[in-house]
Image (cartoon, rainbow, N blue to C red):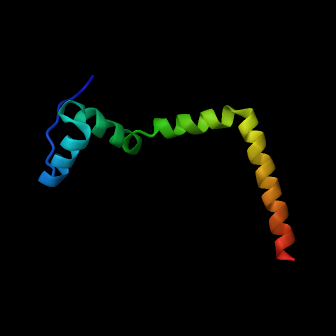
Amino acid sequence: MHKKMTITLDEAVYDGLYRTIGKRKMSQFIEDLLRPHVLDTSLDAGYMAMAADQERENDAMEWVNALAGDMENEAK
């Protein structure tokens, strides 16, 4: 369900938005920009998907262990 709202923008910002995005696509563009800032589900879903990728997790663990080894050698 969509709700209609009225917002106020600086004229230069509106003109740039109109030129860049087009009149019929402004609402979706603004919604896409705002969504990750007001709904936390997309970030959570992204982290869950990354954690489920076992190959990526294995690569990350190798990288962390190698970095820890480098730091241990550097401190001496």
Measured from the top left, where is residue 69 in percent x and y? 85, 62
**Horizontal placement of 62 versus 51: left or right?**
right
Residue 49: percent from the left, percent from the top?
Answer: 61, 33
Task: State the residue at coordinates (18%, 34%).
Answer: 23
Residue drawn 19% across the image and 41% down it: 18
**Residue furthest front as drawn:** 19
> In this rendering, would 52 be left or right of 19?
right
The spot of residue 53 in percent (x, y) is: 69, 33
Q: Is residue 26 above or below residue 1?
A: below
- Residue 10 visible (yes or no): no
| Above or below for 76 versus 39 | below
Q: How many marks?
A: 0
Q: Is residue 11 left or right of residue 42?
A: left
Could you say which is closer to the camera, residue 40 or residue 26?
A: 26
Res. 49 visible in picture: yes
Q: Is residue 45 above or below residue 37?
A: above
* Picture residue at 74% right of the left edge, 46% below the top: 60
Q: Position of residue 28 (x, y in %)?
A: 29, 33
In the rendered structure, the answer to whether residue 56 lies left or right of residue 66 reads left
